[in-house]
Image (cartoon, helix red, strand yellow):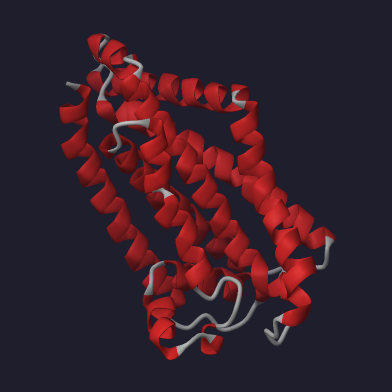
Amino acid sequence: MSELAVRGAHTTAMIGRCVRLSRRNIDALLTALLLPVLLMLLFVYLFGGAIETGTAYVTYVVPGVLLLCAGFGAAGTAVSVTTDLTNGMIERLRTMDVGASAILGGHVVASVVRNMVSTTLVLVVAVAIGFRPAVQPLRWLAAAGVLLLFLLAVSWMSAAFGLLARTPEAANGYTFLVMFLPYVSSAFVPVETMPSWLRGFAEHQPVTPVIESLRGLLLDTPVGAAPARAVAWYVGILVGALLLSALLFPRRAA
């Protein structure tokens, strides 16, 4: 069997392992799937009537909730990578010549799968409570592409955080930034309503162009340069996370 085929088999096996672990961890799975839905219901029914966005609040808030899904899923990725390091699992895998790309790739793909399921659940509930997206297939495909790039970049970044952390608790703390950024963006309120000292950060941080892209593509409104800025941000983050993971893995695995 060629080296490429062996690496592919290793990666497939690691993906299967991580998906099975996610399925067996019922508490974490329910949190990843249900917490974004509960947050969306909280914002829509408790705060939505007091926030003026020019449209139904459920329509405005859905893109931000989709990104929160990724934040919760990312926390699980960092914790699972650190857990494998601290309990000796990666050492055992290395003795079988399983490479870093297969080990980390398994965690990342499992994270993307969890997030896709969570995203689908959020969209179904959002439609049930009044979200009415546009129906153009090309815009849906473009929105899915932007969201998938975001999920992939955030998941690899979380894997790198997992390599940096010394304990699962610390890994969970590292991902706080990922979960915090959507709150300081256009996810839940228009940036124009923010204080001037905060508005500049909200407009130019990496989460805002993703939210504006999803909002425009799903609702068939102009998107401007938001998709290009989102792609530039997250291609850069993905490349940086891959390089950092490649640098850290040999040191931690040793």
> Where does the image place residue 163, in percent across and percent down from the top left?
28, 35
Q: Is residue 49 above or below residue 100?
A: below
Nearest the viewer among 249 and 149 is 249
**Residue at the spot 74% in from the left edge and 74% down from the top edge:** 48
Q: Is residue 156 above or below residue 55?
A: above
Whole-percent x, y for residue 29 in the image: 62, 34
Quarter residue 249 falls in: top left
Instruction: Look at the image and tell me in which quarter the C terminus lies.
Output: top left
Residue under the point 70% across and 87% down: 54
Whether residue 141 is visible to the viewer of this picture, yes or no, is: yes
Which quadrant of the view contains residue 135? bottom right
Q: Residue at x 26, y 28 (%)?
A: 100
Find residue 165 and report its horizontal and vertical position in percent.
Answer: 30, 37
Residue 58's place in the image compared with 55, above or below, is above
Question: What residue is at 31 percent from the left and 23 percent from the top?
Answer: 85
The number of callouts visible is 0
Q: Is residue 235 left or right of residue 222?
A: left
Viewer-nearest residue: 97 or 89: 89
**Quarter of the image where the N terminus is located:** top left
Give x and y (percent) for residue 103.
34, 26
